[in-house]
Amino acid sequence: HEKSLDLFAQTIKMGAPYDMEFNAKINLATSYEKGNSQQIKKMLGKLLKDEKNNDFQDQIYFALANIAYKEGDVDKALDLYKKSVEKSVSNKYQKAMSFLAIGEIYYDKKKYIVAQPYYDSCVTTLSEDYPDFATLSTKSKNLNELADNHKIVLLEDSLLRMSKMSP
């Protein structure tokens, strides 16, 4: 892990072609584990402001969200993952990973009904050759079924309440 961080930093310093430097910066941010993240956030902020990165803002917001999540700021991470989805134009994989991250946060919080549409969007956006696709697909189907049953229960409860009301 430390070696990869060093290599990403070296790539950034060596004046590599822009796309390689950009990817090194994103991977450096994505590899962040703990410690002082201010320098990485500052670097990502500069990338966001640079017009030539407009098509890559989804990746930048995703990296910022990962840092916020690792620092324990789940609400900020959710906002940033949602911005990543919003800014995603042509990178379906990135959009799917953002949907997945949001879904997993809600799932971990046991907010299954809220997690359901994110898993569903992830599965419909991801390619079937994704390593955990079968697992994600099964989880998505289960959450879809749970959400459908939840809607039925809410409707039945509402109808029962109405049936007990005076005309």
Image (cartoon, rainbow, N blue to C red):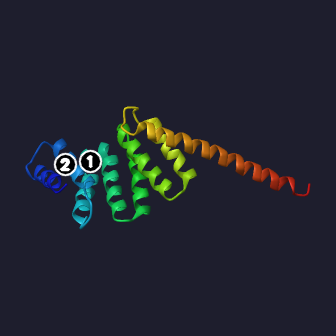
Q: Nearer the viewer, residue 102 or 81?
A: 102
Q: Nearer the viewer, residue 75 or 18?
A: 75
Residue under the point 21% across and 46% down: 23
Residue under the point 76% across and 49% down: 156
Q: Are marks 1 and 2 in contact (CB under 8 Å)?
A: no
| Image quadrant in which the N terminus is located | bottom left
Q: Is residue 130 above or below residue 41?
A: above
| Precedes in sequence: disc 1 or disc 2 | 2
Q: Quadrant of residue 41?
A: bottom left
Looking at this view, name the residue that lies furthest to the bottom. 36
SS of the residue at dot 2?
helix
Residue under the point 45% across and 52% down: 104
Q: Disc 1 marks which residue?
A: 51
Query: Dot 1 surroundings within 10 Å: few (below 14), some, or many (20 or more)?
Result: few
Mark linked to residue 24: 2
Q: Is residue 151 visible from the viewing direction of this image?
A: yes
Identity of the amino acid at label 1? Glu
Find residue 82 and report its horizontal and vertical position in percent: 43, 51
